[in-house]
Amino acid sequence: MRKAALVGFCLVLSGCSGFGKFVGDTATLPGANPNAPSGEDLNMRRVNGYSTAETPLLPAGGDIWPGPPAPLPTLEDVEKDRAGTILGGVPNSGSTQLPDGGEMSVGEPEGLSDKSHSITGKLPDAEPDAASQYGVQRGSASTIEIPNGDGTVTLIHPDGSVTTTQAKKAAAPVAPQH
């Protein structure tokens, strides 16, 4: 009965992976290293010192490499292409092009492109607060306190000013009485 149970136990254990793999993973021949890596591929044969025969890589017939990339267009090509299409073959939108020798600037009304304008004056120091136009109410903000590691606190006030002051010592918490 015990012999039959042993054979049945071995068959049950080998059911998942196969009997050969089970025996190969659990038993070794006397004198064999159970911790040696196993394998029969080309690199393992080389590591174990066996002779290897491999098929050399042979050159393929014909030119398998793609040709050189297309050259970048020159400024002359771009100028010629400007009349009909832009680069990439997309038709031109038909909008007026800047004439040769013309000037371009931002924010000019149409018809004044041939005149030159210069910006004079000083830029404003601050922009007006436009939040009220969008329904945002100011004044509900509070001061933001950012503790620093050196015992000071940086305060950011609602008006945007920033100050740094000494941190106030907090009272030690009182332990609850039982």
Image (cartoon, helix red, strand yellow):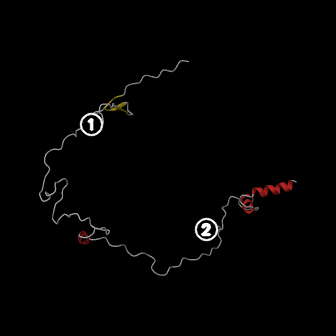
Which quadrant of the figure has residue 106?
bottom left
Q: Which mark is residue 96?
A: none
Instruction: Give the spatial CA distance, label 2 vs label 1.
Output: 76 Å
Q: Position of residue 3 (x, y in %)?
A: 86, 56
Q: Horizontally, is 173 left or right of 92 in the view?
A: right
Q: Position of residue 114 (x, y in %)?
A: 12, 59
Instruction: Decide: few, some or many residues near mark 2? Use Cα within 10 Å; few <14, some 14-19, many ≥20.
Output: few
Name which residue type carries label 2.
Asn
Name which residue type carries label 1.
Ser
**Residue tagged 2:** 43
Q: Horizontally, is 53 left or right of 118 in the view?
A: right
Is 79 rendered above or below residue 63?
above
Q: Horizontally, is 57 left or right of 124 in the view?
A: right
Q: Position of residue 93 (x, y in %)?
A: 26, 64
Q: Which mark is residue 132?
A: 1
- Camera-side mark, 2 or 1: 1
How many numbered marks appear? Answer: 2
